[in-house]
Amino acid sequence: KMRLAELKDFPACTVDGRRVELCANISGVNDLKSVEENGAEGVGLFRTEFLYMDSMHFPTEEEQFRVYREVAEKLNGKPVTIRTLDVGGDKDLPYFSFNKEQNPFLGWRAIRICLDRVDIFKTQLRAILRAGAFGRVRVMFPMIISLDELRRAKEILEECKNELKAEGKSFEQNIEIGIMVETPAVVILAEKFAREVDFFSIGTNDLTQYTLAVDRGNEKTAGLYNPLHPAVLNSIKRIIDASHKAQKQACMCGELAGNIKAAPLLIGMGLDEFSMSAASIPEIKKLIRSLSYEEMRTYASKALEMDTSSEVETFVETILNSSSDSLK
Ligand code: PEP
Ligand code: MG
């Protein structure tokens, strides 16, 4: 029986040969040690907002470039997905005043801010593009609800490339572009979005919040907040299927990706990349290496037909108990 630490250099592969990628979520350079130690195959989510929150001013292009470059270089050929600024909602900046909003999570946040403040957006995109010359860098937009937003963001990215080219700066011309799947709007229009992105990354924290209309941070409604709700699971399945139909990669970077209870179902649904807190990787990997993809496909179809979250939870507990028996 293999100990967790010994799994570091083994692939996340089911007993019948289905290979998935296990990546880490980071919020800065300091997290890279744990990425390495836990054998992550890359960074599936770099939450860049902390760079902005820990500063006393909007970080300049050079300040951002230095950080993104360091991450890209230290990953030594492994990919990093850099998410553009995701503030607003519950995340403030000390040097920027957000007007008080009735519903901040439905308000001026993330990509909405960036598309209104193109100057701020461009500074970040230029830094990301330039870091792309030093490693495998991908860019990802948060809180998308419409193709207009995606197309506008891509247009601004193209403008940045043209500027950098004119200035003679080196950058990644063919950077891969993805979006976070955090809203029911993207789930419902999944096929359309899939044609215009290189990858999806399912943000189950917000997707659960917006699908169930339950505040993710409110203790009083915490009992209602459940990513194993059949509506959320079916949304996830819909996104994975739309990705694969368009031959794109389906990733997940919300907390559910590191949830033991969800792993058998996510494997069975065909998720390609799981990105989570690096510390969770060994345990998820160990579990995946004990599962059969064919079996999980059958279980996932069953779970997707269930009526309630509690039915799903009872079902996955049964799956997990039988898989831990087989490990003994
Ligand atoms: C998510 O919403 O699932 C996500 C990964 O983004 P964040 O938790 O930073 O909102
Ligand atoms: Mg989110």
Image: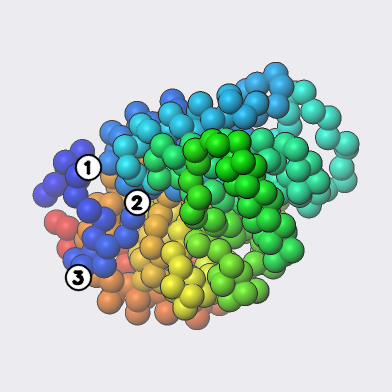
Spatial separation of the CA atoms under disc 2 and disc 1: 11 Å
Q: Position of residue 219 (x, y in %)?
A: 67, 44
Say which mark, if any, is on residue 22: 2
Q: Which residue is more in the foreground, 307 or 149?
A: 149
* Amino acid tagged 2: Leu
Label 1 sits on a secondary structure element that is loop
Q: To which quarter of the image does residue 281 belong?
A: top left
Identify which residue is drawn at 62% across, 29% down.
Answer: 61
Q: Position of residue 110 (x, y in %)?
A: 70, 46
Ranked by sequence position, the earlier of labels 2 and 3 is: 3
Q: Is mark 2 within 8 Å of ligand 1?
A: no
Q: To which quarter of the image does residue 263 belong?
A: bottom left
* Amino acid tagged 1: Lys
Label 2 sits on a secondary structure element that is strand
Q: Quadrant of the C terminus?
A: bottom left
Q: Badge 2: how crowded within 10 Å, few (<14), some, or many (20+)? A: many
Instruction: Give the labeled residue for mark 1.
Output: 8
Instruction: Give the labeled residue for mark 3.
Output: 16
* Amino acid tagged 3: Asp
Q: Are marks 2 and 1 in contact (CB under 8 Å)?
A: no
Identify which residue is drawn at 19% across, 49% down.
Answer: 10
Label 3 sits on a secondary structure element that is loop
Q: Which residue is more in the foreground, 2 or 82?
A: 82
